[in-house]
Image (cartoon, rainbow, N blue to C red):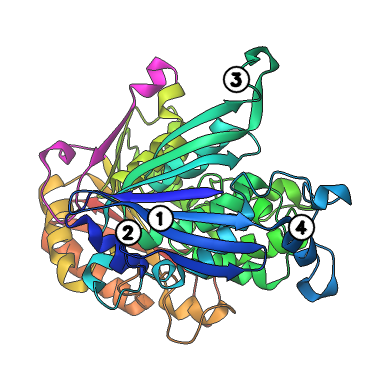
């Protein structure tokens, strides 16, 4: 099975430093099911391609089965006796290739490069090709999984037999991904998605696989619109582990947006309790309705969870979502199915790329603006620029803003002492600090404001989320 990774970033041969594999040599690694080879079919200043070839030994594959803690792995194509030796594993990319990735590109997966640390932290143009990939659900599923992560996806179904097209399509696809990402992000996406698309993990799925998934999926899994599908398949449809993973995603990342598929369908029937993210959206929606807003800005809209709520309320005649990240805007468009909305609905919605620390003429004159879990992602010295751009220049009649209450963090069991709720948070305020900031902004820009909590109000540490409604005076 083969996977190639190509870049045109100059000098392209720096890819060797990122992968810690010299382009002028071939490299071989023993893995439990055979041998993994790394070589460079092309390596010059303009273009460099690294190829990972996994040579599967059927005998080793059969021997490797069931080693994990002496138990049997989840069902795979080789589960029956003869199938251990006669199967598609040596020829089609699958979860075996993900295991080889972790063995061969260990440093690159962590984003480490001793010789090119700056480049390792930089997004560069990449093209990934997997010519034969086992994909349950076909090309459409591959697009749903990789598209929201910033990839342009070309997935072509492979026919069962070119000489007999009437036989239809096989379970395999030819996959090409193009995009501008960090090499570490690209490899981590593959590490998770290859077994998800295969949907037949070849080894025993133990509870520590939950930790591994959350670690590798940090920064992108929580907001993925197919999160539930990814978690269930990666954990081999083990309900207990999938439920644990989804709960930990919510507990460790309270900014999580549950508008995505969260796997509730796999849980026992019970009276569900709204998550904090859902209650936050409900509180923001209520504040907008109370303000009588019709033309609304969602500033820093991220993956579009609030946009989906606003679109469902016809009182909002114009809805604009902005974000500095084009990847986030693409995710939002997919979540709200912008391209499938009826024309009348689609005309209500606009998505703009815009930075909240710069004045933007397109954002002036609206009834209301929402900053939901946004300001804490800015470095504190950049807050005055946001204040000027939103309250001073755009100047909507109402601003609804939410941010975490850091005092409540002690109630999250999975959160280390002194840690923030999200790795990208630059600060989190106490209730007193937030009230002081709200008072200062109101006085400076001519607004009045009220502050209230969102979520269960703990008598000692307050509600988990703080909400302020600014009204222009």
Q: Is residue 136 above or below residue 282?
A: above
CB within 8 Å, label 1 to label 3: no
Question: On the image, numbered disc 1 is attached to which residue?
Answer: 186
Q: Nearer the viewer, residue 419 or 94?
A: 94
In the displayed structure image, the side of residue 281 where residue 369 appears, left or right: left
In the displayed structure image, the side of residue 36 where residue 77 appears, left or right: right
Please state which of the two labelled residues, at mark 2 or mark 4, is closer to the viewer. 2
Question: On the image, numbered disc 4 is attached to which residue?
Answer: 238
Q: Earlier in the sequence, mark 4 or mark 3?
A: 3
**What's the distance in space between the residues labelled 2 and 4, CA to CA?**
31 Å
- Count neighbours of disc 2 (C-alpha within 10 A) and say few if under 14, some if 14 to 19, many if 20 or more: many
Q: Is residue 346 above or below residue 109?
A: above
Q: Earlier in the sequence, mark 1 or mark 3?
A: 3
Name the secondary structure under disc 4. loop
Question: On the image, numbered disc 3 is attached to which residue?
Answer: 162
- Residue shown at 56% from the left, 58% from the top: 98
Name the secondary structure under disc 3. loop
Q: Nearer the viewer, residue 227 or 203?
A: 203
- Residue shown at 55% from the left, 31% from the top: 140
CB within 8 Å, label 1 to label 2: yes
Please state which of the two labelled residues, at mark 3 or mark 2, is closer to the viewer. 3
**What's the distance in space between the residues labelled 1 and 3, CA to CA?**
32 Å
């Amino acid at each position: 099975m083969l996977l190639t990774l190509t870049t045109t970033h100059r000098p392209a041969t720096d890819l060797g430093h990122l992968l810690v594999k010299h382009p002028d040599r071939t490299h071989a690694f023993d893995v439990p099911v055979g041998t993994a080879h790394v070589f460079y079919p092309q390596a010059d200043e303009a273009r460099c391609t690294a190829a990972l070839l996994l040579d599967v030994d059927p005998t080793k594959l059969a021997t490797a089965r069931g080693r994990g803690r002496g138990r049997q792995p989840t069902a795979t194509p080789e589960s029956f006796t003869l199938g251990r030796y006669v199967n598609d594993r040596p020829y089609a990319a699958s979860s075996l290739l993900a295991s080889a990735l972790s063995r061969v590109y260990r440093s690159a997966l962590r984003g480490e490069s001793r010789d090119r640390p700056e480049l390792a932290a930089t997004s560069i143009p990449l093209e990934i090709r997997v010519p034969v990939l086992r994909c349950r659900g076909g090309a459409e599923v591959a697009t749903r999984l990789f598209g929201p992560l910033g990839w342009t996806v070309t997935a072509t179904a492979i026919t069962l037999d070119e000489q007999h097209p009437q036989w239809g399509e096989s379970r395999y696809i030819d996959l090409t991904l193009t995009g501008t990402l960090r090499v570490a992000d690209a490899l981590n996406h593959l590490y998770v998605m290859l077994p998800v698309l295969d949907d037949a993990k070849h080894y025993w799925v133990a509870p520590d696989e939950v930790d591994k998934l959350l670690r590798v999926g940090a920064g992108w899994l929580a907001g993925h619109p197919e999160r539930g599908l990814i978690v269930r398949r990666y954990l081999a449809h083990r309900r207990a582990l999938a439920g644990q993973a989804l709960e930990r995603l919510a507990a460790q990342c309270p900014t999580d947006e549950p508008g995505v598929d969260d796997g509730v369908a796999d849980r026992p029937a019970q009276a569900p309790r709204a998550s904090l993210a859902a209650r936050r959206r409900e509180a923001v929606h209520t504040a907008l309705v109370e303000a009588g807003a019709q033309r609304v800005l969602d500033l820093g809209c991220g993956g579009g969870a609030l946009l989906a709520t606003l679109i469902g309320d016809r009182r909002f005649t114009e809805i604009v979502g902005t974000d500095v990240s084009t990847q986030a805007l693409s995710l939002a468009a997919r979540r709200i199915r912008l391209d499938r909305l009826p024309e009348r609905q689609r005309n209500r919605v606009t998505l703009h790329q815009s930075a909240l620390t710069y004045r933007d003429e397109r954002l002036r004159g609206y009834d209301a603006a929402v900053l939901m879990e946004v300001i804490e992602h800015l470095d504190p010295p950049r807050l005055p620029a946001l204040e000027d751009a939103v309250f001073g220049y755009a100047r909507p009649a109402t601003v609804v803003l939410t941010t975490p209450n850091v005092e409540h963090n002690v109630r999250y069991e999975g959160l280390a002492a002194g840690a923030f709720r999200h790795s990208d948070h630059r600060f989190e305020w106490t209730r007193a600090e937030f009230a002081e900031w709200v008072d200062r902004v109101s006085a400076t820009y001519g607004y009045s404001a009220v502050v209230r909590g969102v979520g269960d109000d703990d008598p000692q540490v307050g509600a988990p989320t703080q909400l302020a409604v600014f009204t222009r005076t």
